[in-house]
């Protein structure tokens, strides 16, 4: 195992940097168009289209805004119900609450921390309008079942694939299976632009409405393509278009996606193999990836015995210069969750499993010697 000075700190996350980001940002500045939909926005969109085999890509200022666009394009109306897990980030719910929807939370599977597909049908009512599967840790939900239910009840499916960029369900990219997919390029994600995201979809019928929505309700996109001689206010809209400087940073990362992906998998695989003895001893549970699923090494987490053990472990790691983190506080237990939603059925796993989960440092620039040090300390912890 590695030798390391105790003074050095290992952060939980550090945004990826591969080398050309600042060069591309300078190039964007030199081109004199910083407001978005310039060269780098188009390059990023084309990369996503080609790599994930999806028809339409709209780069956004965040995954939150991608979700808001999806909620609007899904025609969510006041009083509609939207099914999702409670174990997710607030943006998943916020996007639909802003449209006046009521959130219906469904319990998660303890093996993947994803929405339990077997509990969805009993949560469907005449008011249900959409299902929002959240692909936790870049591990796909059971999309065949979800899509079958959506077809049966004529529901929209909005994939929250914030953590699922370059992860796959039986060979199909996450985010491209449902009606809409929402990606995140936040600084904590595999590929980043600081703050950013993307909305993707296959049905070209949504293109014009999405363009108007993203461009403050105007037909400015048509104007830039030379289809009209002036642009006008057409419909409801907002400002969802990211800066060219952000897109330039992202494009440098997309060009090096293979290198970033391989490094993250190297760290993930090292953690996973190293934690096997602890799992065999019944001290922790490691992440589970079902057959046919290709994860993207977005995060590596452990599940310990209980909340008390997790609290001790976080403190112990911090004392040794290692910054770890738990994750979501279930939305249904929060003030807004109680105000805007309800839990369908019983909370068997959502709260219990969320209190056991601990995320380890995972980022592209993490040195393998640092990963070795983290494992060294974990193996010495008195579980």
Image (cartoon, rainbow, N blue to C red):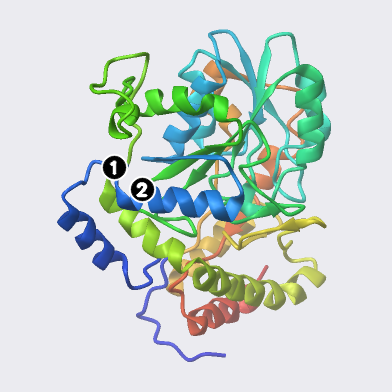
Q: How many tags in the picture? A: 2
Closer to the N terminus: mark 1 or mark 2? 1
Judged left or right of residue 376, residue 15 is left
Judge by depth and name the residue closer to the eye, 206 or 344. 206
Q: Position of residue 31 (x, y in %)?
A: 18, 54
User: What is the quadrant of residue 238 in the picture?
Assistant: top left
Determine the secondary structure under disc 1: loop
- From this viewpoint, is residue 281 visible? no
Q: In the rendering, at what x and y percent does residue 303 appear?
A: 68, 57
Question: Which of 336 and 319 lies nearest the eye of the viewer?
Answer: 336
Mark 1 = which residue? Answer: 36
In the image, residue 181 above or below residue 323: above
Residue shown at 46% from the left, 58% from the top:
191
Residue marked by disc 2: 41
Q: Is residue 103 visible?
A: yes
Q: Are marks 1 and 2 in contact (CB under 8 Å)?
A: yes
Q: How far across and down, in percent of the image, does residue 274 sit? A: 68, 78
- In the image, 112 versus 343, the foreground residue is 112
The picture quadrant where one finds residue 171 is bottom right
Q: Is residue 248 left or right of residue 133?
A: left
Residue at the location (63% across, 15% down)? 81
Quarter of the N terminus within the rendering: bottom right
Q: Separation of disc 1 and disc 2 at Cα?
A: 6 Å
Residue 130: x, y in percent? Answer: 65, 22
């Amino acid at each position: 195992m590695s030798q390391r000075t105790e003074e050095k700190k290992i952060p939980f996350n550090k945004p990826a940097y591969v080398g050309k980001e600042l060069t591309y940002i300078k190039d964007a500045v030199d081109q004199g168009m910083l407001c978005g939909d310039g060269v780098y926005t188009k390059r990023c969109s084309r990369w996503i289209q080609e790599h994930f085999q999806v028809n339409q890509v709209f780069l956004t200022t965040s995954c939150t805004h991608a979700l808001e666009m999806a909620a609007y394009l899904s025609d969510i109306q006041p009083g509609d119900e939207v099914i999702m897990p409670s174990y997710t980030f607030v943006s998943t719910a916020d996007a639909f609450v802003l449209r006046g929807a009521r959130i219906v939370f469904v319990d998660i599977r303890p093996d993947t921390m994803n929405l339990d597909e077997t509990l969805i049908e009993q949560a469907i009512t005449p008011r249900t309008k959409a299902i929002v599967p959240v692909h936790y840790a870049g591990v796909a939900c059971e999309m065949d079942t979800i899509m079958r239910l959506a077809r049966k009840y004529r529901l929209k499916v909005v994939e929250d694939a914030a953590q699922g960029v370059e992860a796959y369900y039986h060979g199909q990219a996450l985010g491209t299976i449902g009606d809409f997919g929402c990606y995140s390029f936040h600084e904590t994600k595999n590929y980043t632009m600081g703050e950013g995201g993307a909305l993707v979809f296959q049905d070209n019928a949504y293109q014009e409405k999405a363009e108007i929505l993203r461009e403050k309700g105007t037909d400015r996109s048509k104007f830039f393509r030379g289809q009209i001689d002036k642009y006008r206010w057409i419909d409801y809209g907002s400002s969802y278009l990211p800066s060219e400087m952000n897109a330039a940073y992202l494009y440098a990362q997309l060009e090096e996606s293979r290198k970033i992906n391989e490094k993250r998998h190297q760290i993930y695989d090292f953690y996973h193999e190293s934690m096997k003895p602890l799992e065999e001893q019944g001290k922790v549970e490691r992440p589970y990836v079902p057959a046919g699923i290709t994860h993207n090494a977005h995060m590596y987490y452990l599940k310990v015995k209980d909340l008390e053990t997790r609290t001790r472990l976080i403190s112990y790691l911090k004392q040794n210069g290692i910054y770890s983190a738990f994750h979501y506080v279930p939305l249904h237990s929060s003030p807004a969750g109680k105000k805007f939603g309800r839990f369908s059925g019983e909370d068997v796993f959502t709260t219990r499993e969320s209190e056991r989960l601990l995320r380890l440092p995972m980022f592209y620039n993490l040195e393998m010697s640092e990963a070795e040090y983290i494992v060294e300390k974990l193996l010495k912890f008195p579980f």
